[in-house]
Image (tube, grey):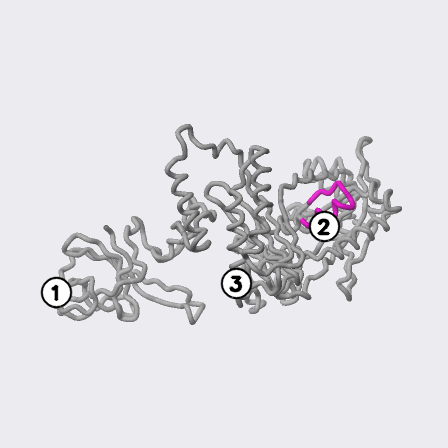
Amino acid sequence: MSTVRVGANSSVTRTLVVWIPDWPVRAHALAEEISPDSPIALVDRELVFACSAAARAEGVRRGLRIREAQAKCPELLVFDYDSALDHRSFEPVVSAIEAIMPGVQVLRPGTCALRSRGPSRYYGGEEQAARMLLNTLASLQTLRSDTHPDSADVINARIAIADGRFAAEQATRMTAHPRTAAPIIRIVPPGGSPAFLAPHPIETIGDLPLATLLRRLGLTTLGDFAGLDFRDVRARFGETGVHAHGLASGTDVRRVTPRLPPRLRDIEMSFEPPLELVDQITFAFRTAAEGFVAELTQALLVCTGIRVELHTEAGGMHERSWGHPRWFSASDVVDRIRWQVQGRTGAGNGALRSAITKVRVVPEELDSIVNYETGLWGSTPDDRVHHGLSRVQSLLGHEGVVTASIGGGRGVAERQVLVPWGDPVAAQPTIAPPWPGAVPLPAPSTVFERPQGVTVRAAGGATVEVTERGALSGPPLLFLAEAGAPVARLHPLTAWAGPWAVHERWWDQEKARSFHRFQVVDADGTAWLLALHNHEWWAEARYD
C-alpha cells in the first residue's frame, strides 16, 4: 500500500467514542413500558428505522418495509420512530458523561465523542479514562421501568479510542465479545488507524453510491481505496471522494466540537418518605412551581410546554409532555402534576406500583414574554375564554374539556379528533394522504355522533340492495330519515350518486368491515351521506 500524503497543517485528533447499541429501541421500549429484549421495530416513512436484537435474530433489518419485517417476525412490535423522544432520553447519559469528562459532542442519540487527550492525562492513561467512563455508565440506571424492573437495568456501552472519529466509531462496532454482550474497551494505538481500517469492507465508508462504484472498480476494502493517490482520487471523484479517501486512510481531520450544555431551568423535588396521596404531592410542589414561574418571568420568558417526570420508590420513571394554549402559571403546573398522578393510579398498565420519591418538571418550549403581555385595555376575549376553560378543566380533569381538530381517515366521523384543552394540535398536512374510498369534497357540515337509521326504497317498495358485483337491485327513488317508517310516508329523491365500495381493515378479522356509500338529495333539497352496511341503511352525515 502506498504512503498517504497529508497536508502540513492536517492533524488527527485522538478521539474517544461511546456507543450504546440499539439506543432508539431501548428508549422507545422504556416509553412504552415493555421489555427491550422483545422483538421491536421502529418505523419511519413506512421503513424500519431501527430494530432490537430479538428482531434481527428473526431476519428483520433496517430499511425493510413493514410488511416484509412482519412476515419475517409475526410477533414483531411496531412503533413509530419519535426523534424527540430519542434525543430527550439520551440527555441523562450525556449529562453523566459531562460530569466526569467535559467536552462531549453528541453525534446522534446513543453515540457521542470526546477528545481523548484531556481525560487520559487526568485519569492516568487512555485505558484508565475509558474504564472510568465505562463504570459511570454501567451504574447509570436510566432504562428501567416498573413493568420490567429487571430488564435494561444497566446501560451496556462500548468505548473505543483511535486516531480520528471515523476509526473510533468503527472500533466500537468490534468491541462486543462473540459470546457475551458485556462491554469491552478497544484502543487503537496512535498511528494504527490506517492498518486497523484497511480490512474493513468498502461499504463502511458510508457513501453507498461511491462504495458501489469503487467495488465495481475492484476496490473492495478501505485499504484498497486508501492505496490510491489522493490527487487521482480528486481528479476522478472530486471533493466527496477526497473526504472519503481521508476517512479510509485513517486521517479523519474532523474535530470534536463540544456542545454547550443548556442552562438548566428545570425544577425537581424529592420526598422523604415517599408520598402516595395526590394532595400531598401537589401541596408540597406548589412553592417550587411558583419559584419556577417567577424565575422564567425574571428572565423575560414564559413556558408553553413542560415535561413532568414521576420517579417511584421502585426505581421506575413515568413521564409525559404537556402543552398549554397560552403559557403555564404556577397553578397550571400543579394541575398537570395532579392529572398525571391521577392518571397513573389504578390497575391499568400505566398505574403506579409504588410511592413517588421525586417529581421533576422540565420546560420544553420557551417563548419571549413580550408575545404574551396584556393589552393596553386589559385582557382580550380569548384570554377570558382560556381562563374560563382552564378553570373548568381543573375541576373536571384533563379530559374534561376538549377541542375538535381535523385528522385523517376515510369516513367523516374518523376525521374529527377531540384533543384535551391545552394539548398541541397536529398541523394539517399540506398534501392529504391517499385515503382510498374517502368521502370527496366538499365535506358535509353535520356529522352525526352515531349513524342514524334511514329507509331507502326502489320504485316497487323493495329495499335497495347492492349485489356482490356492485350492481344495484334498483334505483333509489324513495327516502325517509327515520328507519321503519311506513311506505306511505316516504318522500321521493331528486338525485343520487353511488355506490362507492369501502373495504376497511381486511387483514383484521375482528375489525374488518365492508359497506357502500351513497349521496342522495331529498325532495326538500337536503343532501345526505348514506351507508349500506349488512343490508341496513344508515345516515352518516348531512349537507346543510
Point out the stretch of residues depicted in magenta. 92-106
Disc 1 packing (10 Å; few <14; some 14–19; many ≥20):
few
Q: Give SS at disc 1.
A: helix
- Viewed as shown, does residue 235 lie left or right of 199? left
Q: Position of residue 394 (x, y in %)?
A: 45, 51
Q: In this figure, which residue is indicated by the disc labeled 3?
A: 67
Residue 455 x/y as whole percent: 20, 66
Label 3: how many Cα within 10 Å (few below 14, some 14–19, many 20+)? few
Q: How many marks?
A: 3
Measure the alpha-carbon separation of dots 2 and 1.
80 Å
Residue 489's label in the rendered image is 1
Say whether disc 1 or disc 3 marks the residue closer to the N-terminus: 3
Q: Which quadrant, please, contains the N terminus?
A: top right
Residue 482: x %, y % from top left: 20, 64
The three-letter code of the residue at mark 2 reads: Ile
Q: Earlier along the polypeptide chain: callout 2 or callout 1?
A: 2
